């Protein structure tokens, strides 16, 4: 029995040492990866200290051009948006990690209906992209617990990178250009054949709304100027999709830039990559317009003419 216990303890010790050692190697590879998910998460959680952050899902990733905002606002900007139907579970965990390092001055949150509606395939599991930073902040850990993956990530550091292994092996040969500070432009023009408006026939989710409210409260507690934004679509549903968001912004006294049905974009094929994403030309036009709106709000807040 004693020999068996010794064998079990030695095996557990070897597992622990091997896991932690390999975990350090994978962590270093992760920090240097230029794959979209890996770069966006690592840069946001451990590198950027920019004054203005843009947060959101793929529509943020492709639509917000930091260089244009920097030129207009005169401060450093970074696009922390990521693809993969990232939602409020991910955003809240990411915000918590960022605040464990530094406090940005302004956050512009690109809001998608998945922030308050019970969209399928868009639940707490979306926080799983933050796995490499398990333990960095209580907010991140809370989201991983809701996703049911916290303890496996705590037990094994290698397991945190399981979904990233192909991208880690590819090293720096990913699609992200670090000089663009988180923006990933889309080159191409939408094929409008058969394009229909995206519909959102889903019920409000109380848990998501509560997290969205906590996101607002956390920004306010840290004296971060939070602004909400909705970027353009090529074609829009007739439903009042963002009625909730307008009420929410008014209730919490937040600026809301709603470009969902912006006539400068809707139906303009040359500005879109697909029905929900602007191409490079469209993103630059949108960023030029929005940067001026953000600047106006900031000037008013500081009493500057």
Image (tube, rainbow, N blue to C red):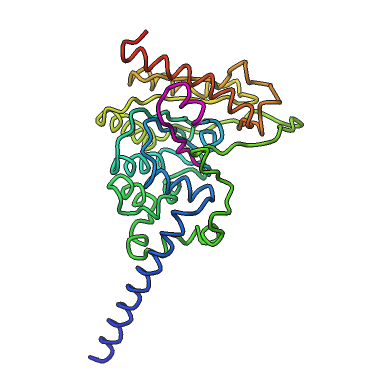
| Residue at 33 percent of width and 65 percent of height | 155
Residue furthest right in the image = 193
Quadrant of image for the N terminus? bottom left
Decide which of 198, 271 is in the foreground and name it. 271
Q: What residue is drawn where x is 46% and y is 34%?
A: 117
Is residue 191 found left or right of 174 in the rendered image? right
**Furthest residue in direction top, as rendered:** 305
Identify the residue at image location x=48%, y=41%: 86
Give residue 305's position: percent from left, percent from top. 37, 7
Check the image and report above or below for 299 versus 233: above
Judging depth in this view, the residue of 10 and 102 nearest the camera is: 102
The part of the image, by quadrant, that contains residue 24 is bottom left
Given residues 166 and 302, the one toward you in this image is: 302
- Which portion, as a residue range, is magenta? 66-82
- 44 shown above or below 266: below
Q: Is residue 118 magenta?
A: no
Describe residue 73's horizontal placement relative to residue 58 as left or right.
left
Asked which quadrant contains residue 6, the reply is bottom left
Quick check: 138 left or right of 259?
A: left
Give coordinates of residue 222: x percent, y percent. Answer: 26, 31
Q: Which residue is located at x 53 percent, y 42 percent?
A: 83
Image position, residue 32 (x, y; %): 47, 54
């Amino acid at each position: 029995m004693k020999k068996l216990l010794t064998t079990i303890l030695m095996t557990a010790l070897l597992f622990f040492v091997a896991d932690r050692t390999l975990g350090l190697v994978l962590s270093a590879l992760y920090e240097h990866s230029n794959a979209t998910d890996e770069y966006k998460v690592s840069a946001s959680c451990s590198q950027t200290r920019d004054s203005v952050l843009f947060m959101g899902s793929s529509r943020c990733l492709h639509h917000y051009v930091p260089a244009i905002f920097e030129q207009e606002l005169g401060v450093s900007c970074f696009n922390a948006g990521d693809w993969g139907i990232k939602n409020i579970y991910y955003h809240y965990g990411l915000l918590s990690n960022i605040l464990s390092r530094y406090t940005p001055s302004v956050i512009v949150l690109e809001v998608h209906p998945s922030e308050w509606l019970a969209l399928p395939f868009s639940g707490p599991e979306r926080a799983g992209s933050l796995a490499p930073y398990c333990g960095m902040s209580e907010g991140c850990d809370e989201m991983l617990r809701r996703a049911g993956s916290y303890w496996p990530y705590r037990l094994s550091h290698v397991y945190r990178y399981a979904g990233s292994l192909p991208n880690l092996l590819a090293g720096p040969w990913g699609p992200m250009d670090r000089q663009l500070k988180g923006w990933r432009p889309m080159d191409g023009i939408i094929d409008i054949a058969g394009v229909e408006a995206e519909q959102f026939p889903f019920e409000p989710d109380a848990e998501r709304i509560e997290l969205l409210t906590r996101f607002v409260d956390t920004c306010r507690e840290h004296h971060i100027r939070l602004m909400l934004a909705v970027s353009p679509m090529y074609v829009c549903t007739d439903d009042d999709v963002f009625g909730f968001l307008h009420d929410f912004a008014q209730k919490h006294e937040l600026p809301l830039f709603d470009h969902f049905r912006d006539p400068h974009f809707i139906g303009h094929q040359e500005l879109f990559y697909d029905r929900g994403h602007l191409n490079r030309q469209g993103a630059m036009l949108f960023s030029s317009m929005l940067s001026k709106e953000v600047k106006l709000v900031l000037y008013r807040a500081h009493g500057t003419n």
